[in-house]
Image: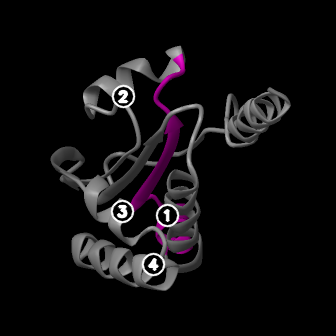
């Protein structure tokens, strides 16, 4: 019985360590100039893979596209889709769990959204591959 109690407490503590109630990141600039919007939606309690996806997305954007982010060519959204404040955005992109999507813009209007969630989950554990492939994809889209 003691082992089960300890295991249960350990699980609860690990879930709370990976939960997020604040700290969403939305970096949105001039929609008229926007070429690519990178969106990562997550739930409050996340697994290691979900945390890795966020880390990899942030690293890709901040290490390779900081200038484009600052000048408004790229927007970055990392949001908890379970929070009421993010409900409309989550519904717009059909994000009801961990969802990674990239939306392209043409002449200031949303053009096409590609759900890359499956790709992100497959590549999450290989940070160098994730970053390289995402960097190539974004470079292709912002041309």
Q: CA distance from mark 2 to mark 1?
A: 18 Å
- The reply to whether dot 1 and dot 3 touch (C-beta < 8 Å) is yes
Q: Name the residue carrying label 3.
A: 120
Residue 24 is marked as none
Residue 73 rendering spot, x and y as whole percentages: 39, 62
Identify the element where label 2 is drawn.
helix
Q: Name the residue carrying label 2.
A: 90
- Residue 81 visible? The answer is yes
Q: 10 Å neighbourhood of mark 3: few (<14), some, or many (≥20)?
A: many
The span shown in magenta is 65-83
Figure check: 9 above or below 65: above
Closer to the eye: label 1 or 3: 3
Q: How many labels sit on residues?
A: 4
Closer to the eye: label 2 or 3: 3
With 94 as the anchor, is 135 left or right in this view? right
Give the quarter of the image for residue 35.
bottom left
Give the quarter of the image for residue 4.
top right
| Residue at the (34%, 67%) spot, across then down | 122
| Residue at the (78%, 38%) spot, across then down | 10
- Which numbered disc, 2 or 1, marks the residue that appears first in the sequence? 1
Q: Name the residue carrying label 1.
A: 57
- Which numbered disc, 2 or 4, marks the residue that appears first in the sequence? 2
């Amino acid at each position: 019985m003691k082992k089960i109690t300890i295991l249960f407490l350990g699980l609860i503590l690990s879930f709370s360590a990976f939960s997020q109630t604040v700290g969403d990141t939305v970096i949105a600039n001039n929609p008229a100039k926007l070429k690519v919007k990178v969106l990562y939606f997550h739930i409050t309690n996340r697994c290691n893979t979900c945390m890795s996806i966020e880390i990899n997305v942030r690293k890709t954007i901040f290490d390779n596209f900081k200038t484009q982010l600052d000048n408004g060519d790229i927007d970055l959204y990392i949001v908890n889709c379970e929070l009421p404040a993010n409900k409309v955005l989550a519904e717009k992109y059909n994000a009801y769990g961990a969802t990674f999507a990239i939306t392209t813009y043409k002449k200031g209007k949303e053009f096409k959204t590609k759900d890359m969630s499956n790709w992100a989950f497959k590549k999450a554990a290989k940070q160098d591959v994730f970053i390289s492939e995402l960097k190539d994809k974004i470079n292709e889209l912002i041309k």
